[in-house]
Amino acid sequence: MASSDHTHHDGESYFDGPPGILAKVWQWMSTVDHKKIGVMYLVAVLFMFFLGGVSALAVRYELLDPVRTVETINEAGEIIQYTSGQRLAGLTNIMGAQNANEVYNRIFTLHGAIMVFMFIIPSIPASLGNFFLPIMLGAKDVAFPRLNLLSWYIYVIGCLFGVFSILLGGVDTGWTFYTPYSTTTDADHWRVILMILAAFILGFSSILTGMNFVVTVHKLRAPGMGWFDMPLFIWGIYATAVIQVLATPVIGITLLLLVFERVMNIGIFDPSMGGDPVLYQHFFWFYSHPVVYVMILPGMGIISEIIAVHSRKHIFGYRAIAFSSLGIAGVSFLVWGHHIFTAMGELAAVLFSGLTFLVAIPTAIKVFNWIATLYKGSIALNTPMLYALIFLFTFSIGGLTGLPLATLATDLHLHDTYYVVAHFHYTMMGGTVMAFMGGLHHWWPKMFGKMYSEKGAMTGTILVFIGFNLTFFTQFFLGTQGMPRRYANYVDEFQTLHIISSAGSLVLLLGFLVHLGTFIVSLIAGDKAPPNPWGGLTLEWETESPPIEHNFHHEPVVTHGPYDYETTVPPHWDPKDFPLPKNPSSH
Amino acid sequence: MSTPTLASANMSFFQKIIFGDHAGSEAGAWSDGLFMMITWFSIVCFVILMGLMVFWVIKYRRRPGVPAQPSPNHNIHLEILWTVVPSASMLVMFVLGVRGYAMKMVAPDAAMELKVDAWKWAWKVTYPNGAISPEVKFLSFKNNMAALEAGSTEPWMETKGLEYPVFYVPENTAVSLRMNSQDVIHSFWIPEFRTKMDVIPNRYTGYAFHTPKLRDSDMVLDTSSMMQIPGRDMWIFCAEYCGDEHSRMAATLRIVPQKTYDAKIKEWGTPKDPIVLGKSLFNTMCKICHSADGTPSTGPTWASGNGFGFGYEAALANGSSAMRDDNYIRESILDPNAKIVTGYVPSMPSFQGQLNEDEIHGLIMYMQSLSDRNPNAGQTGKENQQADDSAGSDG
């Protein structure tokens, strides 16, 4: 190795640190190692996932029954009225809310804001992306390691603003901060501004990470690795990074305008001061629609990796998948209007409907390619692969149920209903979270050098699958039958479906707890992981588990494609264990 | 309106599971048909994809020592096929979607125009003759009546819920809406017509629908006469999040025969006792935030006692106090944030231009009727110059 710092030597894993707890903490907090930063992101992001999950459970708890005011006669013979079903009413005083409904509104806002800004946007790129992007490129680190650490600190500061706002009582604007509601609600309170600033600050973290990744991909690929020799996970992260850099400044400016309007009464969005409330929605979705693809593209990248490795096949249509990632990133900037079909003119609605269908095509192509990759493979049905198959199942439902939302006539009915809630949970949770869980199981042995119990992980996976579908499939029917979003109270006929949905959320919780337990047991008592447990061909499998400080002992030279399973024996494996096909195809 | 081509006259079992009931309009039935078409297309795609996936996962499951078999890793013909077929299918959906959109949005020339006003958290509909509906309906009133008629007297339990305004429209009529919000963005959704549009401050939005013909079985309870009359009730929900009582911002759209409708709006359009007018306005517009019986709510109660009510001093948030007299009420309606009662937050929108002079007078008279005091009694030279003269000009 050309360089090595004084505390680390070749052969030492990246998390072997100096003795002493304080020294260790300082080493982590001041590290510029992309792997440590990736693990720090992983911990922070999973903590936010936990907070968001708790608020989701609170939402499902409140929705167990509709709010009913009942008139009856008590034992003394007097007519009394009482209200039942306000299950979160006990939090009214703690949160300083006016009434039970406001408590509910704050909690669903927390769920949305935490899950979107603090969990799902940074989830895959900042944790798994940070850890694996340089290794898969054959680099020692990202292009700007210090910037990388800075973006983690900015992320944490942003989260602290959000958590602080929650501790002060939370906000009831919805995660979308639609004006003029967001500029007028709780007018004398600073928590709304704190929450907006949280999203604003988190944007900087996102921009810095994105910029870092773009430069890393352009400049730090190993010798021999052309653009089309890159693993598809890198393509996904790259397309994501481009969107992050281009779109995030728009939300930054928009949120800042929102703060100006609240604090200084400058009429930008509020019509009572001469502003235009729908303008805010255009600004907001101009960022937030491309960000939907920030959430899903890295997940798609993970699925490409998992399916190829665990079925030992060259990914079908490599270039189609790579270009469709870029295509999705490009078209995603042109479809923001489909979030506001009910607030725009007829011509704009027709245009945006057409463009929205356009973005569906590259997504469909990817799904076809993944399924075609399975053909004639040698498919190992382990936890990462099971998650990839679950992804194909749930994400296909998410994608297909988007069609009636892109179709104008049907969207007028379905817009702002539980149908939309179900649809985007099938894409975001059924897509991104399933891919994240799959990726975490796929790369866990590499990241921490420990194997996990396959039985435990499988149990968790099956519970998550059942719980997820129970929770969200019912919500499609709630939506088509007339249940609006963001309702604390509802009419009686929706109760059965709501109960099923809430029961599903408990199964989902159980599944994630099983996963948590499996991971903790693995860290404490797991078997030592071999360098290449799945027989992968991408560069992360050439180095040790866990990787050494500088990733590789020698700078790797790329001599085969990332998916050439038909012609290459995986590193660290005997040809007997992974026999090559007899007649490798010409491609 | 064009004839529906996709909607089937009889709902399939599957469609019933999805939508619960028939759409209330031709345009709604047409878009349900389109939804079913897309759904069947999706089911076929999904079954093919998942079928192949499961079949291959089982057939090509890993066996020790058996390698993957070689196969091409791309195929240009296949890839073109699976790009073109979805694109063509989506083009069809797009075109049909635009057509159905036009059916829901474009009003025929002869459509009856209703003015819809929205605020946190209620709806108001103004009829072509200037009348507004004073009627309200309990969430599940009909069920209670059925239970009482069935002889369930002791011990009884009645679901009361909230009262929602009832808006009347004649059957088999084209209706177009002109909508405007006084504060934040709302959305006027009639699920049975399968359509909604946002209601935005400082801008008109709208859509159109053709009300259905009533079926023989369509009967509703007329709360003004307590009689069963021919009619059909539909929910109206606010679909755009608007704050605390968003989920209670509902109303009922009642389809009735033309002659019932004509009689109703004629009755509401004629001048009436100001207290009766004030009470009906209170029931349809104010009750979501104010109570008439002292129950705590989002806004101060109108019942007298405990520092509330007409003729009682209001303790204000800025430490001062004000007498609740006629000018105080007028100001509170037209400029609600001028004086905030202590313990409450400014959340009421201004009704400047929304209520005419008679209606404001009616509200004051109704509030006065709830109180045992009258601070204006015996006064001669009233200081009414402080009231805003430009407000509420009679329409």
Image: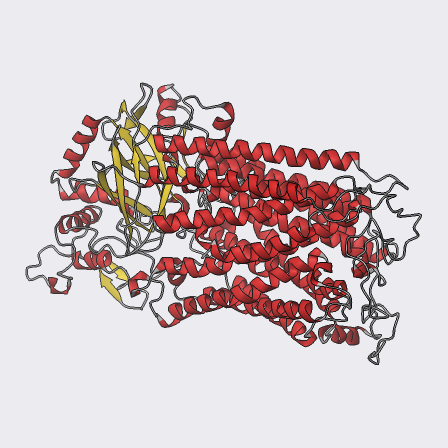
On the rendered image, what quadrant is the N terminus of chain B found in? top left
* The image quarter in which residue A277 lies: bottom left
In the foreground, A166 or A40: A40
- Could you tell me how many numbered marks the image carries? 0
Q: Is residue B230 left or right of residue A225?
A: left
Side of A218 relative to A68 (left or right): right
Residue drawn at x 59%, y 40% is: A397
Q: Name the residue at the bottom extreme.
A: A6
Measured along the vertical axis of the image, is residue B388 above or below residue A362? below
Q: Give me the residue at 73% from left, 44% from top.
A: A373
Q: Nearer the viewer, residue B237 or B243?
A: B237
Q: Is residue B41 above or below residue A175?
A: above
How are the colours assigned in the image? secondary structure
- Is A431 in front, or is B71? B71
Q: Is residue A559 visible?
A: yes
On the picture, is A394 further left or further right than B146? right
Residue A339 on image: x %, y %: 45, 51
The answer to whether any part of residue A430 appears in the image is no
Query: On the image, which quarter does residue B94 sit in?
Result: top left
Q: Is residue A497 above or below residue A244?
A: above
Q: Measuring from the top left, give residue B374's x and y in whole percent.
A: 16, 53
Q: Residue furthest left?
A: B380
Q: Position of residue B38 (x, y in %)?
A: 50, 35
Q: Between B156 and A320, which is closer to the camera in this rendering? A: A320
Residue located at (23% from left, 26% from top): B257
Q: Relative to B220, is A96 above or below?
A: below
In-image side of B319 versus A564 (left or right): left
Residue A308 x, y percent position in the rendering: 75, 49
